[in-house]
Image (cartoon, rainbow, N blue to C red):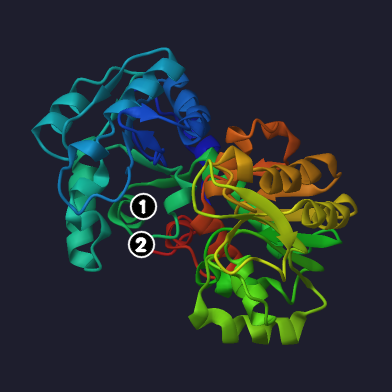
């Protein structure tokens, strides 16, 4: 892949550079509750502005239904980006319309503009190549001749979308620092990682992770299961899981995984059960096979943390994706905190697989530099580890 350094060596002063960033941050009203993705985009933006480029950022936020929706406006992101850069970031009120054309035309060398949410245009996510291509044509025309494209939103490279894939076929395309770093890290995990190699998976649904579990089990030494998905595994062992999150349609699949790889799969020994799903719920620690009928497991228990930490202490490579419990509720955050701290305390090459895991690191106050790499793209990381081709990477590698 051609990368950002290649583009900078060619020269960008006075050139417009369209950058696909991942600025999909969580919001509470207009307040950003975790600006990790905005901060992660800064190195690429700064390198370009310092070299004199006119930077045009495109990104999505949330899941609007292909039309403008004020609650998904990128205005809060533009403000935060400006604060972090120490310079105004002009926000276009549309994607390729009059506002975008005016804002881009007014850019000075070394300045930054942000286009409005790319998913306000239904063509961005269309399954029709011609529709996506038409939007990509307009984006390319917006930045004009002699422009370049930098793909720096790893969280979307697994999507065949206009601003990720199609525009890279219309402009000279380069991998940004984030995408390059992510691919290099994931190649380490899928190549010949140092052993023992341990994967920790959490999150809510087995169905979301089933493919990656099947892909990873032949390659790892241990696979530790936490989060809501653990209860389907416990049910597959014949345990009553009360009102815990349960995917009954996945029980047979998990039974087969346990039969085939029971020596590698590690399940919780105990859980923190709650009488309801609430931050102030009554709670009790119970054995994993003794969850009361009308209670629900919301975290792994202390014996489970000790078990997981013991395995993680002696590992050489760790991939972690998905919290061990409902870490957003302080009363049910100890499992996730304990697992994360065990990874920090190990000497392993450690990769946090984005999404909720990355948010947990920041929310729980864990040192970000305690991990070798914190991914910005949970879904993309998992698909890469499954062995799937990522369209947004393939197009950078020369698939035309």
Inter-mark Cα distance, 1 to 2: 7 Å
Dots 1 and 2: beta carbons under 8 Å?
Answer: yes
Which residue is nearer to you in this view: 276 or 104? 276
Is residue 144 in sight in this rendering? no
Residue at x 36% of width, y 27% of height: 31
Q: Quadrant of residue 109?
A: top left
x and y percentages locating residue 322 in the rendered image: 60, 54
Is residue 13 in sight in this rendering? yes
Query: How many numbered discs, if any?
Result: 2
Q: Quadrant of residue 362?
A: top right
Which residue is nearer to you in this view: 255 or 145? 255
Q: Is residue 314 above or below residue 246?
A: above
Q: Is residue 149 above or below residue 91?
A: below
* Badge number at residue 183: none
The residue singled out by tag 2 in the image is 160
- Judge left or right: residue 10 versus residue 100: right
Q: Is residue 380 above or below residue 151?
A: below
Q: Quadrant of residue 237?
A: bottom right
- Judge left or right: residue 53 versus residue 201: left
Name, please, the residue furthest toward the right: 314
The residue singled out by tag 1 in the image is 164
Residue at x 57% of width, y 61% of height: 295
x and y percentages locating residue 206 in the rendered image: 55, 70
Residue at x 82% of width, y 55% of height: 303
x and y percentages locating residue 391 in the rendered image: 43, 62
Q: Is residue 151 above or below residue 91?
A: below
Secondary structure, mark 2, is loop
Residue at x 80% of width, y 45% of height: 342
């Amino acid at each position: 892949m051609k990368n950002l350094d290649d583009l900078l060596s060619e020269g960008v002063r006075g050139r417009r550079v369209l950058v696909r960033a991942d600025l999909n941050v969580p919001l509470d009203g207009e307040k950003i509750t975790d600006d990790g993705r905005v901060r992660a985009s800064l190195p690429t933006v700064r390198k370009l502005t310092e070299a004199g480029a006119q930077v045009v950022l495109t990104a999505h936020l949330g899941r609007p239904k292909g039309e403008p929706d004020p609650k998904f406006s990128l205005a809060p992101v533009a403000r935060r980006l400006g604060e972090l850069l120490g310079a105004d970031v002009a926000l276009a009120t549309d994607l390729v319309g009059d506002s975008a054309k005016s804002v881009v035309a007014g850019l000075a060398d070394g300045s930054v503009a942000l286009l409005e949410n790319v998913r306000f245009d239904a063509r961005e996510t269309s399954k029709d190549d011609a529709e996506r291509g038409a939007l990509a044509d307009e984006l390319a025309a917006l930045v004009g001749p002699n422009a370049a494209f930098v793909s720096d939103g790893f969280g979307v490279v697994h999507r065949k979308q206009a601003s990720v894939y199609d525009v890279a076929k219309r402009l000279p395309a380069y991998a940004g620092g984030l995408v390059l770093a992510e691919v290099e890290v994931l190649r380490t995990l899928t190549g010949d990682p140092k052993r023992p190699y341990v994967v920790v998976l959490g999150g809510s649904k087995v169905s979301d992770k089933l493919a990656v579990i099947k892909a990873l089990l032949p390659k790892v030494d241990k696979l530790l299961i936490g989060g809501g998905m653990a209860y389907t595994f416990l049910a597959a062992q014949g345990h009553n899981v009360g009102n815990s999150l349960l995917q009954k349609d996945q029980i047979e699949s998990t039974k087969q995984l346990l039969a085939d790889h029971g020596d590698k799969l590690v399940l919780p020994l105990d859980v923190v059960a709650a009488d309801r799903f609430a931050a102030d719920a009554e709670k009790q620690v119970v054995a994993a096979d003794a969850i009361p009928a009308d209670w629900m497991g919301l975290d792994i228990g202390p014996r489970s943390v000790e078990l997981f930490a013991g395995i993680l202490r002696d590992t050489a490579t760790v991939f972690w994706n998905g919290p061990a419990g409902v870490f957003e509720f302080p009363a049910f955050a100890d499992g996730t905190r304990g697992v994360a701290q065990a990874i920090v305390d190990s000497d392993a090459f450690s990769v946090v697989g984005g999404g909720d895991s990355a948010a947990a690191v920041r929310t729980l106050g864990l040192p970000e530099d305690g991990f070798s790499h914190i991914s910005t793209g949970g879904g993309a990381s998992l698909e890469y580890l499954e062995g799937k081709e990522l369209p947004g990477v393939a197009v950078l590698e020369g698939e035309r």
